[in-house]
Image (tube, grey):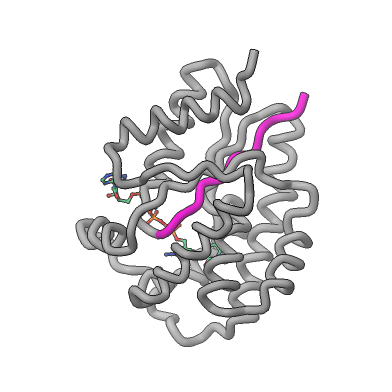
Amino acid sequence: MSGIFITFEGIEGCGKSTQLDMLANWLRANGKDVIVTREPGGTDLGEKIRNLLLDGSKSDIFSVRAEILLFEASRAQHVDEKILPAIKSGKIVLCDRFCDSTIVYQGVARTMDLHIVKFLNEFAVSECIPAMTIFPNISVAEGFRRIALEDSSRDRIEQEDESFFEKIRSGYLKLAKENTRFFMVDGSDNVEIIHEKIRNEFAKRFFKN
Ligand code: Z5A
């Protein structure tokens, strides 16, 4: 039996991690075997790469090429070690960020050639393509407002300015328009309402009988 691979994408603060946990709880309550993971990270090696990539004190050490190769290295390890084996053994894998993050952050916002970004994504993911991508859409101002309410310091990428995140949001809106695997939901709604919409869409796409 083959499992299901679901990704969550969006600008920071959009609520994707909250919704990922809620979907995981609902699926587990319905007897499903679920793995929750994230990018960058998800494996020992990936978490080491994550620490390097997001370290807020290292804001000027990465070239754009070095940055994208580190995201892709984390992804290749993640796919080989964790995601593909889980899918092959019939599990549902919920992943916080995946390839689309690289398209919008490194491709659209950092303006790296999109052909190269797509080629590197394909190389890293092999046959591991998400069956559905859940995208809570909020304004950049709302994302900033939510992050400001949190106590934690801002990581290296979160230190970018508002225009950077406007590019990210436009990039996601374009991807959502072009790819039927995307499910865009209004992320400014109440968390329970968003969860219900995601649950219903998930059931419609995967629990047909
Ligand atoms: N990155 C990249 O550049 N290239 C790549 O290929 C990959 C990643 C894979 C990872 O950051 C960074 O790496 C990310 C992109 C880059 N940088 N940025 N920006 P991360 O994993 O540390 O964090 P994040 O993914 O950006 O998001 P986040 O901070 O974890 O936020 P979130 O997942 O979108 O939202 P949340 O944690 O569920 O909620 C945020 C807050 O809002 C929290 O206080 C909630 O209680 C609140 N919330 C959630 N939903 C609601 C609603 N509906 N109403 C009101 N408040 C809400």
Q: Is residue 64 above or below residue 40?
A: below
Percent x, y of residue 108: 55, 72
Q: Is residue 197 above or below residue 130?
A: above
Q: For the point 54% across and 29% down, which residue is it?
A: 202
Report the span colored magenta: 1-11
Indicate yes or no whether the magenta region holds residue 141. no
Q: For the point 25% across and 56% down, which residue is it?
A: 146
Percent x, y of residue 186: 37, 44
Q: Ligand 1 shows up in which quadrant of the image?
A: bottom left
Q: Is residue 121 above or below residue 26?
A: below
- Quadrant into which the C terminus falls: top right
- Quadrant of res 22: top left
Q: Is there any visible trace of residue 39 in the rendered image?
A: yes
- Quadrant of res 47: bottom right
Q: For the point 57% across and 35% down, which residue is it?
A: 35
Q: Nearer the viewer, residue 124 or 118?
A: 118
Q: Is residue 35 left or right of residue 122?
A: left
- Quadrant into which the N terminus falls: top right
Percent x, y of residue 171: 52, 64
Query: Residue furthest toward the front?
Result: 177
Q: For the point 75% across and 29% down, which residue is it?
A: 2
Percent x, y of residue 55: 43, 72
